[in-house]
Amino acid sequence: MKYADLHVHTVYSDGTSTPAEVVCCAKEKNLSCIAICDHDCIDGIAPSIAHSEEVQVEIIPGVELTIIKDTKEIHLLGYFVEWKEKWFTEILERVQRERVTRLDRMIEKLKSFDIEIDRERVMRISGGKGSVGRLHLARALVEVKAVSSIRVAFDRYIGDFRPCYVEDIGFSPKEAIDLILRAKGVPVLAHPGVIEDDSLVKEFIKYGIRGIESFHPEHSQADREKYEKISKEYGLLVTGGSDCHGLGKGRILMGSVKVPYDFVERLKEEAGRIKAARTSN
Ligand code: AMP
Ligand code: FE
Ligand code: FE
Ligand code: ZN
């Protein structure tokens, strides 16, 4: 039986594993296929593909876009996006620049708690490439001993709606879904159980998502069953993955959530339909 992990991060966003390490780990975990889905960044795709050839792990080019809706942060996965398209990479580069500005604003807010963080420290932790984010800032807070753990950094300072949190600019739901479709990718709502607002799921369906990430480490069995049911009801695909951030979230999660390779076949068929429809337009 072949398996795939359809949600993996690299050092090009807030994962701690390089593309070479990610591919190696996939091989060790006996995965046939992984999807590289960095936050607002596609730069980890090419090196992952380059390393995948010798070990024969299939790489799905993906991305995880940040959406802000009514101050909530929601994530949208895009599978099989045309990641080499210049217009697409330019949009992501703009988002990455906005993330640095947002980082500066969070650093500023931390000052009112007498915490001094150098932007350079965070950039060094992030590797200075791709998307910088809160997980890097949390690691910096641990490094300067302002907090005892990443969890405390989020709980006390930079978690959603905590005092030093600054919202990403983010896309609107419609913008993000349209962007993935324009890049001829398959838009899939990431881990809806984390958002805990099912009216949003309906809104995303209305705007054209093609799938729901039902299998995710932060989903309970009840969540999974609920999202599988909704997917079935609306004729959507089901996807799943570990959302592995390397050691960024404590331990390597790759392979802890995986789906049968059939799921990949169905994603490919959908990607084919989207590409055909957009090419004929
Ligand atoms: P950002 O894209 O900068 O908003 O950062 C989002 C990242 O922070 C995602 O990888 C989330 O999983 C992670 N994150 C959000 N809240 C927490 C939390 N309470 N503990 C650990 N990681 C979190
Ligand atoms: Fe992340
Ligand atoms: Fe996510
Ligand atoms: Zn993710």
Image: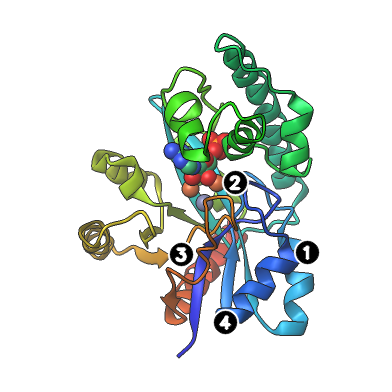
Q: Is mark 2 within 8 Å of ligand 1?
A: yes
Question: Relative to 201, is 72 on the left or the right?
Answer: right
Q: Quadrant of residue 229?
A: bottom left
Q: Mark 2 points at which residue?
A: 39
In this picture, is 127 found above or below 256? above
Q: Count how many numbered circles sit on residues in the image.
A: 4
Asked whether the residues under the numbered discs 1 and 4 touch, taking CB atoms below 8 Å apart as contact, a structural biologist would say no
The local secondary structure at tag 4 comes to: loop
Q: Which residue is drawn at 71% across and 33% down?
A: 122
The local secondary structure at tag 3 comes to: loop
Q: Please report whichever mark, 2 or 4, sits nearer to the chain's N-terminal start.
A: 4
Asked whether the residues under the numbered discs 3 and 4 touch, taking CB atoms below 8 Å apart as contact, a structural biologist would say no
Q: Name the residue under label 4.
A: 32
Q: How far apart are marks 3 and 4 (CA)?
A: 13 Å
In the rendered image, the quadrant that contains the C terminus is bottom right
Mark 4 nearby-residue class (10 Å; few <14, some 14–19, many ≥20): some
Q: Is residue 176 visible?
A: no
In this picture, is 186 found above or below 51? above
Q: How far apart are marks 2 and 1 (CA)?
A: 16 Å
Q: Position of residue 182 (x, y in %)?
A: 59, 50
Q: Where is residue 94 in the image (x, y as percent from the top left)?
A: 71, 33
Q: Residue at x 46, y 17 (%)?
A: 163
Q: Position of residue 146 (x, y in %)?
A: 58, 26
Q: Mark 1 points at which residue?
A: 47
Q: Mark 3 points at which residue?
A: 241
Q: What residue type is labelled 1?
A: Pro
Q: Which residue is drawn at 34% across and 41% down?
A: 195
Q: Where is residue 76 in the image (x, y as percent from the top left)?
A: 48, 48
Q: Distance between the residues labelled 2 and 4?
A: 23 Å
Question: Relative to 158, is 194 on the left or the right?
Answer: left
